[in-house]
C-alpha cells in the first residue's frame, strides 16, 4: 500500500520519441492502481496536449470542459491606422501587410504574427492592440480508474508548455483535495518545452525505451532531461525481445549510469489488440505476457514510493 504523504507524489512516464508504448503502459498503470487488493486513488494526466491519446483507452466521461486562452496577437484598428508604415519596419516576422479593404491602412497576418507586441509600442497612432487567443480546451474527466486531466491544443497553436502546466496544476490540486497519494503523468515524447513543463515537480521519472536503432539515443536524451531537473530515474524496456543485442546495449548503458531497469516487456500482439478495444491490456488480457510484465513493473514503482521499513 502506498504511504501517506503531505502531498501527492508525481510519476512522470517519458520516452525519447513517440511510439515506444508509453501511453499503453500508463493506461495499464491506471487500471492496476484501481484494481488491486489495495486500490490507490490515483489522478492521471495526459500531458501530450499536441496529440492526446490516453483518453482513447481510459474511457473518460468529461465532468468539466474549459477553454484555454494562450498568447495574444496584434490587431490593427483600421479607423485609427494612418498607413505610416512604422509597424512594417519594426516587425521581424513580416506579419504586417497591406489591407486590401483599406488602401491607407495595414493588417496583421495572424499566422505570421509572433505576438511580440513591437508594433503596438511603435505605432504613433495607437492603432494596434493585442488580442488574447483561444488556443485549445482542457478537460477534467471521470474514468473507471480515477480522475483524468487532459487537453487538446488547436492545430498550429503554440503555448503547449503553458497548457501542460495548467492541466498538471489542476491535477495536483484535485489530488490534494481527494487525498490521492499519486499523480501519474503520461508525458509528451521528446525533450522539448512540453516535456520540461510535464517534468516540473515530478518525484520519479520512468523512461520507456525500446531496443531499436534509435532507442539508446532517445533514452539518453530523456535521461539527460530528467537529470537536469534532478529527478530520480528508472527504465523500462518495451518489446525487449525483438532485438536482443539492442536490449543488451540498453542494459549495459543503464548499469554504467547506475540506473535501475524496473522490468522488460516482451513484444506481445495483445497490446495492439487492447488498443483496438480501447482498454488497458491488464484489463482485457490480464494473463498475456505483456500484462504480467507490466504488473511486476507497477509493483516495483509502488515500492519506489513506499520502501519497506527496516
Image (tube, grey):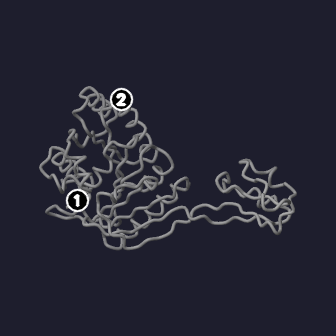
Q: Position of residue 176 (x, y in %)?
A: 36, 70
Q: Is residue 223 left or right of residue 28?
A: right
The total of numbered circles placed on residues is: 2
**Picture quadrant of residue 213:** top left
Q: Secondary structure at mark 2?
A: loop
State the residue at coordinates (81%, 66%): 126
Front one among 256 and 64:
64
Q: CA distance from mark 1 to mark 2?
A: 31 Å
State the residue at coordinates (21%, 63%): 34
Quarter occupied by the N terminus: bottom left
Front one among 243 and 94:
94
* Vertical side of 11 occupied by 145: above or below: below
**Picture quadrant of residue 5:** bottom left
Residue that extends furthest to the left in the rendered view of this protein? 287
Which circle's residue, 1 or 2, is located before the other in the chain? 1
Residue 9: mark in rendering? none
Q: Position of residue 259 (x, y in %)?
A: 31, 39
Q: Position of residue 251 (x, y in %)?
A: 27, 32
* Vertical side of 190 occupied by 180: above or below: below
Residue located beneath label 2 in the image: 213
* Vertical side of 87 occupied by 249: above or below: above
Residue located beneath label 1 in the image: 31
Q: Are marks 1 and 2 in contact (CB under 8 Å)?
A: no
Q: Secondary structure at mark 1?
A: helix
* Vertical side of 218 occupied by 300: above or below: below
**Badge 1 density bin: few <14, some 14–19, many ≥20, Cα 10 Å:** many
Residue that extends furthest to the front in the rendered view of this protein? 101
Q: Is residue 134 left or right of residue 185?
A: right
Residue that extends furthest to the top in the rendered view of this protein? 245
Q: Position of residue 153 (x, y in %)?
A: 49, 58
**Badge 2 density bin: few <14, some 14–19, many ≥20, Cα 10 Å:** few
Amino acid at each position: 500500500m502506498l504511504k501517506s504523504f503531505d502531498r501527492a507524489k508525481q510519476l512522470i512516464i517519458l520516452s525519447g520519441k513517440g511510439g515506444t508504448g508509453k501511453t499503453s503502459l500508463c493506461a495499464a498503470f491506471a487500471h492496476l492502481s484501481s484494481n488491486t487488493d489495495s486500490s490507490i486513488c490515483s489522478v492521471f494526466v495526459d500531458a501530450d496536449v499536441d496529440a492526446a491519446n490516453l483518453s482513447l483507452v481510459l474511457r473518460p466521461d468529461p465532468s468539466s470542459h474549459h477553454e484555454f486562452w494562450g498568447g495574444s496577437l496584434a490587431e490593427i484598428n483600421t479607423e485609427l491606422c494612418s498607413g505610416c508604415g512604422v509597424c512594417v519596419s519594426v516587425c521581424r516576422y513580416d506579419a504586417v501587410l497591406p489591407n486590401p479593404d483599406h488602401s491607407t491602412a495595414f493588417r496583421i497576418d495572424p499566422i505570421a504574427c509572433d505576438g511580440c507586441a513591437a508594433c503596438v509600442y511603435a505605432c504613433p497612432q495607437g492603432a494596434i492592440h493585442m488580442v488574447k487567443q483561444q488556443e485549445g480546451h482542457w478537460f477534467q474527466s471521470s474514468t473507471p480508474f480515477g480522475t483524468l486531466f487532459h487537453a487538446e491544443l488547436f492545430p498550429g497553436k503554440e503555448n503547449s508548455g503553458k497548457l501542460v502546466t495548467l492541466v498538471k496544476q489542476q491535477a495536483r490540486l484535485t489530488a490534494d483535495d481527494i487525498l490521492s497519494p499519486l499523480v501519474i503523468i503520461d508525458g509528451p515524447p521528446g525533450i522539448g518545452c512540453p516535456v520540461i513543463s510535464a517534468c516540473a515537480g515530478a518525484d520519479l521519472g520512468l523512461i520507456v525505451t525500446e531496443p531499436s536503432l534509435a532507442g539508446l539515443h532517445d533514452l539518453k536524451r530523456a535521461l539527460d532531461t530528467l537529470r537536469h531537473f534532478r529527478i530520480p530515474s528508472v527504465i523500462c524496456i518495451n518489446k525487449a525481445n525483438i532485438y536482443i543485442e539492442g536490449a543488451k546495449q540498453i542494459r549495459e548503458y543503464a548499469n554504467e549510469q547506475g540506473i535501475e531497469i524496473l522490468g522488460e516487456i516482451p513484444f506481445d500482439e495483445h497490446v495492439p489488440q487492447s488498443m483496438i478495444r480501447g482498454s488497458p491490456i491488464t484489463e482485457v488480457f490480464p494473463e498475456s505476457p505483456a500484462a504480467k510484465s507490466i504488473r511486476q513493473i507497477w509493483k516495483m514503482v509502488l515500492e519506489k514510493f513506499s520502501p519497506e521499513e527496516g
